[in-house]
Image: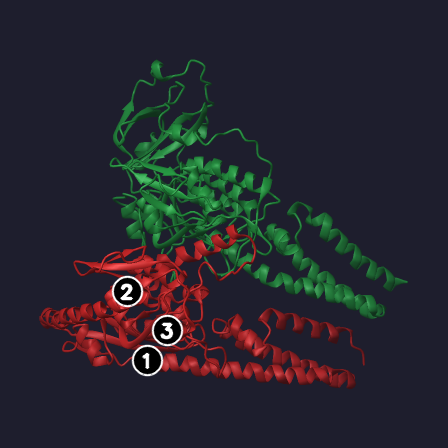
Amino acid sequence: MKLHQLKTKLASALVRTLSVAVIGLALTLPAAHADAAARAKLTLKDGSVVEGELVREVDGLVWLKVSVNGKEETKMFTSSDYSKFQKIEDSATPAATTPANAPKPETKPESKPDSQPAPAASKPAQSDSQTRTANRVPRAAVLTLGEGGDKDMVGIYVMAKPLRDAIPLLKKDNIDIVVFRVNSGGGALLEIQKLSDVIYDEYRKNFRTVAWIDWAISAAAMTSHCIEEVYMTPEGAYGACTGWFGQLQAVQGRGLEEVLFQMEKISARGNHDPQIMRAMQIMEPLSATVSDRGQVQFYNDTTSGNIVLNPKGRVFTFTSQTAEAVRFSSGTASTLDELAKAMNLQEVEWVGVKKPGFAWPICAAEQMQMDFRDKTYKDEQSLDEYRITLDAAMQMAAQGDDERKAKLAGKAREAMNKIISAINNNPNLALFKFNLYPDRFREEWIEPTEKKIRELLKKEKK
Amino acid sequence: MLQRIGKALTSLARGTLAALVGVAAITPMVARAQTGDSPTPARVYYMEVTGEFGYEITQTPIREAMRDARNQGADVVIVKLDSTPKIGEYEKLPDDKQSFDELFRAQEILPIFTDEIRREWTKKPRIVFWVKKAMGGAAFMPFVAPEIYMTSDARMGGVGGIGVMLGSTGDEVVRQKQYSLRMARAEGYLIAGGYDPKIIRAMAEPKYVLSYRLEGGRPVFLERLPERPDEFVLTTDEDDSMEAVVRGQTRSVLTLTADTARAIGVSKGTADNFDDLMFQLGLSRNHTMIQGRAARILDGWKRDVEIASKEIKKRLEEFSQGAEGQGANTYDARTQMRGKQIRQIDEIIARLTRFQEAFGPRWHGVNGVPPVSQFRILKEQIELQQLIDKK
């Protein structure tokens, strides 16, 4: 097992504007605006009612745009969350529930129901996106976040850029559901916010986005935490998010507070109680009670809840059993068929090509992730070799005559160019292999190295 | 008090065992009666997985044997497991060596019996683990199978250390993080296999207190010491004596024996020979043994990895001797010698790469063999030396 280090230096300063209470309010406040968009009302199983703009509806899953503390958020409800779903033809918001000074949220075009993935050009055009989805079998794709072994580190093998680059491919494939299969032992904090943003801002708004957790530890759990709909494999584990560096030194002080706050906000994105993540980050106890109606209340002690999840003095990690017991996960599945069943999909088309050794079809977007990891792996393996060759060539050249210097300078330049190529492909390698910020790599490494090589050649000309 | 509890456990375990044996004796007859209607007897594939975990017991030969079983249409696959922890060629490790982190080595082997079966077999076979010794990382293997049988002298454990393995290194919260993620993974494997995760906690976490009682013949686990006569202790929060450690009778962590495993429902039965096992599986009169290649595959791996290990060490020695005489020769001689060294390095790299899964950090440490990356760098340096050498 390789121990992964959470880099804290790069966590940008955060302004504390949201409170933990955001989560509790999310389900009770109706949307505070009125426009011409379709609206819907959900009666939840605990009896409360949620009303908001209907963003989309797929196979019993409903996305509503609701207002939380004056800020608009899109929330997803599964069929197990609500007992009644009602579309409201008249879009007028009931005055009694609308605060008089509530700000009118900006209506983002991409959040409207008709902003669903466009149908393939060859398919007949349809006027209503909901009808479009309802009239055909949902198309689903599996995207892997890490593949275990040597290709699992967040920040090197799990990155926001290839995920963002994959979205056009998913749209081209007419994908409705994206399942992120997570198999990563963690990695760098610097990538978590970027990953969270691309998943929350782009994936969740375009697709029904699901996490299927096999091994999501530390940064991998923090990345997945913005996803609301979570399933686990039977052997799955999720948690252990303590930040550390060096010889198991804990991140402390302001750095720790910043990460705790960052994860409070990401918990709100995933509609997860913030106390869960907190117990995964620091040694805070956690217990929970599941009511007869299925409502779950978490407590940061070991006595208030019926189920003790994390005793005092421990760091918390979910197993599939504990995650399902407190409804953090919506089910446990070891195969695609089991997953589809857990997701209440009557029918589903898993898009991609079946390949030996893979439990799911490989779609174009997934192939892109695999290719990215393969290339990064090759580069990562060779970087040390290139670097040592470069250093050795430079050292030997410094002691040699002009003829030797010329030969060795050529060898050094060859090694340098290979390094530059690897960093261009994956800029984070600059951080992990050279301890340099990617945006400063040219200035702090390439230019000085080029200068040294030029100097070797200058001496040769004298 | 503890001694009394211990004795009570032993006597009850025997009583339970006797009762369960009675049940087991009936079960095969039922099974025979059921399978007797079947026109085709069960096709049974047998493999003996023995040796040092991670070196001889490793994914490539096991995967190949399982694929052979699949190709031969096996209905039942019996895996006899007998691991021998050792440090080097001649030195064995004590059974109770705390080897919890071999979980991550086991993680590369376990999917062969889970994910790969789901993926590669059209009809899922019945997987049976028959355990003689499963210590260290091997202790995680049987838990992937819903059917475990044991020999009467079986031992399964040697994975203690959660909560203490990192000593006082670093900060407590980071150590707890490391323990937590490991424990969750190990528990996950038991959950997937249908076993209570508290069992692995008792096997792994020193001083975790676990007792059990039987309700309707099924164990109910209690995270405390026994409080009633029908409750029995598995682990306590006390330290073990050296005497207990050497005899494999620890109470701070659980090492499963045939009796204990049977009592708590991990083992379905105790069998000391193949006929006994087949009888308990309900297959003694209705099966066909597949003449598989398992023995050839698994023994072949052991032979090949041993040859590779010796060859690597031999080449490394030759390389070192060649390097000593490097400076005293002519240009042609030096060129020739460097060519030879590069060939030696290439041979070492090829063998290290082929048997990479067997040559873990412990093997490299014990045998003084650097990792592949260093050989690649060494090769690069030799090439640089050649580049600047002059006649």
Identify the disc placed on residue B293. Answer: 1
User: Which of the two discs, 2 and 3, labels the residue nearer the N terminus?
Assistant: 2
Identify the disc placed on residue B5. Answer: 2
Residue at 45% x, 19% y is A104
SS at badge 3: loop
Vertically, is A179 above or below B10?
above
**In front here: A114 or B133?**
B133
Q: What amino acid is labelled 2 in the image?
A: Ile
Query: Measured from the top left, where is residue A336 in percent x and y?
Result: 32, 52
* Image-based side of A163 in relation to B120, left or right: right
Residue at 65% x, 82% y is B319
Mark 3 highlights which residue? B248
Q: Colour of chain A?
A: green
**In front here: A67 or B349?**
A67
Q: What amino acid is labelled 1 in the image?
A: Arg
When asked about the image quadrant of residue A460, the answer is: bottom right
Query: Measured from the top left, where is residue A50 in percent x and y?
Result: 33, 26
* Image-based side of A392 in relation to A153, left or right: right
Residue A350 appears anywhere in the view: no
Q: Residues within 10 Å of mark 1 (few under 14, many from 20)?
A: some
Query: Measured from the top left, where is residue A40 in percent x and y?
Result: 31, 25
Q: Colour of chain B?
A: red
Report the quarter where the C terminus of chain B lies: bottom right
SS at badge 2: helix
Q: Give how far apart the Cα atoms at labels 3 and 1 are.
A: 35 Å
Query: Measured from the top left, where is residue A46 in percent x and y?
Result: 27, 31
